[in-house]
Image (cartoon, rainbow, N blue to C red):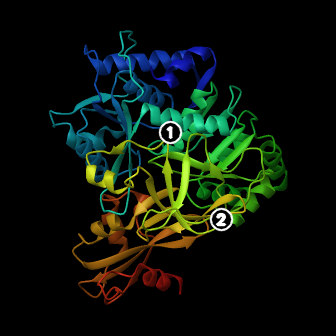
Amino acid sequence: MINLIQKANDNLNRIAIKSDEISYTYKQLLNASESVAVDLLGGKDDLNEQRVAYLVQPGFNYTAIQWGIWRAGGIAIPLCVKHPFASIKYVLDDTSAAMVICSSEFEDLLSPLKERPEIRFMSSDGFSSKEGNLPDIKMERRALILYTSGTTGNPKGVVTTHLNIETQITALTTSWEWHKDDHILNVLPLHHVHGIINVMSCALWSGACCEFLTKFSAKKIFNIFCQNEVNIFMAVPTIYFKLIAYWKELPIDQQQTISASLKDFRLMVSGSAALPISVLEEWKGISGHTLLERYGMTEMGMAISNSYRETRMPGHIGNPLNKVVVRLADEQNTEVASGSQGEIQVKGPNVFKEYWGKPEATAETFTKDGWFKTGDIAIYDNGYYRILGRNSVDIIKSGGYKISALEIEEVLRKHEQIKDCGVVGIPDDEWGEIIGASLILKEEDIDLEELNGWLKDKLPGYKTPRKYIFQEDLPRNVMGKVTKKEITKLFLN
């Protein structure tokens, strides 16, 4: 039995979802997800882990579809609404998705795939009101595949079970003291663990309300806050940066009204990227809250968090959550002495099952005795873990995303005027990092507007370089490997 869905029966008449200014109860969510499940089954007893992808804007329909896939016994694959066709096709091909659900606004985007007989396409608005017998779902079953970029060029599908997801949820609902009267505003993308687990699923597990705002707008966010219903907010540092900038431009009376509303919040969280201390301090001045920083990954949900009630130390991520075991280890996967830096390695029922279809990559990311190797370097000081940086220079953290530089390089090299390239992350107060590309050209010049237009159909916007430099050759070490730190220095000079 999927406990997340079963618990909704205890809150039938409470508001579960608010989207497009419409409120939906837990009973409506259960009924809608049952209709989705019955339609997906199409007379079968069980989908038996068939992969079902869906391209739907955040909101009530999104939630009902995700629950419906799970209730039918399928594996849910949420697609990013901002990704170009090539990225979506890659996910569908990689998972061999049997079904795709999309809303009408994305039908043209997906039209090239509709001739493929192995994929059943369904409209997100086409689920009729139905009841039927649904399979009993064991907690060990695969439930979700989320794609994340690693140090290789191709994104990997992170597979989590229902047990993994429940452990991730309960670790947060216990530590952050979620309850039925909570009301959270979700402004995060729903192809990412932050929006799906930390916000939506924790709220629904608790009998609370999850309100959606499909498109980011600082004005709309503050307007919602001033209605004095929302009492929890979670975002990436980039969003807090934008909210601060907008607040500063407002008249004093509006600033005071917003600040008064924010002071009544129960909890505010920042994650998915390092939080600049300057942003933390400015937000505290506006809201009266010290943002709670935590640490997690797609492969394990949240593993470490600052305390809900105790003092939070800027620049630190806190201590392990319930049922999560953490150690710091050296390059030989041996635990380091206290006070020494090492790679964060994690064990626990929150840790993912596998990378979809990639047994070698799965094996490589675990030690022989079962520790998940995060690739993040940290130190334990003053009673808290503190992140020092990535183990690999090929991961760029920008606006809450972890982006593979190698993936971007592979795309850039396909341009007819580019001979070679090196992609790096450049420190930035607003985004954490922005993407810079050093280009080695076949000819003397290139039209950067044309290049960015060319990239638009091949990469999501957040993976497109923001700055370019030109070199005759890339800096390399004696082994012929590109030295990314030298490229970064050129952008900073």
Q: Residues within 10 Å of mark 2 (few under 14, many from 20)?
A: some
Residue 336 in the image: above or below residue 58: below
Question: Viewed as shown, does residue 129 lie left or right of 171?
Answer: left
Residue 232 in the image: above or below residue 339: above
**Is there CB contact under 8 Å for labels 1 and 2?**
no
Q: Position of residue 475 (x, y in %)?
A: 36, 87
Question: Viewed as shown, does residue 293 lie left or right of 42?
Answer: right
Residue identified by numbered label 1: 196
Dot 2 falls on a residue whose secondary structure is loop
Residue identified by numbered label 2: 276
Dot 1 falls on a residue whose secondary structure is helix
Is residue 399 at least partly visible in the picture? Answer: no
Question: Quadrant of the image for the N terminus?
Answer: top left
Distance from the alpha carbon under mark 1 to that under mark 2: 24 Å
**Relative depth, front residue between 131 and 221:** 131
Residue 103 in the image: above or below residue 43: below
Residue 156 in the image: above or below residue 34: below
Name which residue lies at 42% across and 43% down.
352
Question: Viewed as shown, does residue 489 lie left or right of 475?
Answer: right
